[in-house]
Image (cartoon, grey):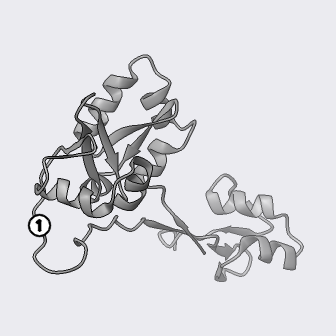
Amino acid sequence: MEINEKLSLEEQVNRRGSRLWTLMNDNSKASKNRDRFVAENGGMFLKNGRYWQWTTPVAVHNGYKLKRVDTGEICFFMSMTEFGQKNGMTPVKICELLNGKRKTYKGWTAVEIREVKESVGSHVKEKEPEKEKIKIFNGATFKDTVTGKVFYIENISKFAKENNINKGNLYKVATGKMKTYKNLKLYNPLED
């Protein structure tokens, strides 16, 4: 039995070449598709080089937005320290902008005012939901047509190698593409 993680919506949209990525980037109606996608799933799209990358609603909630006073350009960022270093600002001054204590600072103003936290420490951030896990079973329950014995094979490939049986045909029996192989058939409890 294998356990694989299911791709999250963010991974599906941002994986280059996927169907959703193509709809959001390399399509004549890409801007309409992005608007529709944001209306359904929330979040926002950010330009990353030539292409658009989707940011989840949780990341948007945890992130920050500032606006350039001169151009009106809105900038989204996750880390105050990194943004401050790029633009010659300190995280304290950015925090004052976001809390509404300052109107402007070095050509930037707040897009939205957030409440000031009373106690010391950073705000509690929302967490991304955990990925769904999918269990993949590599086994099947077979019935020997001669003896009538019913048994479960956990690893079909290993069983085939040990008993000198063609594993491809055994997989075909397990998936229902073949009825029987070497007196083995897929067990169906309704037949008994």
Quadrant into which the N terminus falls? bottom right
Tell me the residue at 56%/39% (across/down).
16
Name the outermost residue toward the top.
28
Query: Which one is nearer the viewer's eye here, 167 or 49?
Result: 49
Measuring from the top left, give residue 28's x and y in whole percent. 43, 16
Measuring from the top left, give residue 84's x and y in whole percent. 37, 55
Measuring from the top left, give residue 32's x and y in whole percent. 31, 23
Tell me the residue at 42%/31% (across/down).
24
Tell me the residue at 31%/68% (across/down).
127
Apparent side of residue 49 relative to residue 164 in the rendered image (left or right): left
Query: Which one is nearer the viewer's eye here, 187 or 93?
Result: 93
Tell me the residue at 54%/38% (across/down).
18
Does 133 sit above or below residue 111? below
Does 163 sit above or below residue 181? below
Query: Which one is nearer the viewer's eye here, 186 or 77?
Result: 77
Apparent side of residue 103 relative to residue 154 in the rendered image (left or right): left
Does 129 sit above or below residue 102? below
Write down the residue under mark 1. 116
Does 144 sit above or below residue 167? below
Measuring from the top left, give residue 55's x and y in whole percent. 36, 48
